[in-house]
Amino acid sequence: MSDNDTEKKPNFDPITLEQVNVNKDYPMEPDEFEILYKHNCYCHMAHISKYGYPIVTPMFYVVLEDGYIYISSVQKYRKKIDQLIANPKISVSISNDGSNAKRQKSIQIIGKAEVSFDQELLTKVHWAIIDKYWFDLKGNEEMRQAAFKGVHTPNRAIIKVIPNKNSPTSWDFGKMVQMYERGVWFNESYQMSKPYDIQ
């Protein structure tokens, strides 16, 4: 018997794939969920505009000690803060961007936004953002302070994402086709787009 005969193959059962409840049937493993939730590069945040349209925006985010997602935005020169104050309904999607379908893993959070202008919270979140997204400045305190000054501006506000009762949910597409592979597989999609990069 050849290796090809014993190789595990995906199960593309059309009934299962059509009728699957992705929010319940194939959740991520708990440790993989925690890694993706806390350490992904960005999230997609959706809120409702004053005209009733869903607005989806890729956002930097951090998870603090309380386990909630925190996002920083600007009130005066952006629209989302005032719109979230008027209508706090919010959803957040976090995906590992797996280009191979069997390694796609995603998290969805549905809930409400708690907008805060508290200076202590702003400072805490903004330093966490600097540490996460400007990690290359570690050891250069002068540049870290300059980066913080650029982020910690007067019109900033913090969005805390409060999940609903049955949220968050997650799904692992590899499980759906009986091809689960352990791991989070961060940024695998770059291998798909790399040939087109201009670097």
Image (cartoon, helix red, strand yellow):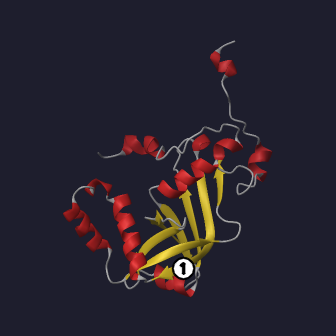
The quadrant of the rendering that contains the C terminus is top left
Q: Quadrant of residue 5?
A: top right
Where does the image place residue 138, in percent across and percent down from the top left? 27, 56
Name the side, left or right, on which 56 lies relative to 11: left
Above or below, 116 relative to 7: below
Name the side, left or right, on which 24 lies relative to 152: right
Above or below, 146 relative to 113: above
Name the side, left or right, on which 193 lies relative to 50: left
Q: Within 10 angstroms of label 1, few (less than 14), some, or many (20 or more) residues? A: some
Q: Which residue is mark 1?
A: 114
**Residue extending farthest left:** 142
The quadrant of the rendering that contains the N terminus is top right
Q: Dot 1 lies on which element?
A: strand
Q: Quadrant of residue 6?
A: top right
Instruction: Kindly identify the residue that appears in the image at 31 percent across and 59 percent down.
Output: 134
Where does the image place residue 110, in percent across and percent down from the top left? 63, 69
Query: Camera-side residue: 143 or 3?
Result: 143
Query: Camera-side residue: 71 or 17?
Result: 71
Where does the image place residue 158, in percent across and percent down from the top left? 45, 77
Instruction: Kindly identify the residue that appears in the image at 64 percent across and 20 percent down.
Output: 4
**Residue extending farthest top:** 1
Q: Quadrant of residue 152?
A: bottom left
Instruction: Kindly identify the residue that appears in the image at 25 percent across and 64 percent down.
Output: 144
Query: Camera-side residue: 124 or 160?
Result: 124
Where does the image place residue 91, in percent across and percent down from the top left? 59, 69
Instruction: Kindly identify the residue that appears in the image at 51 percent across and 50 percent down.
Output: 97
Amino acid type at circle 1 is Glu
Name the side, left or right, on which 95 lies relative to 173: left
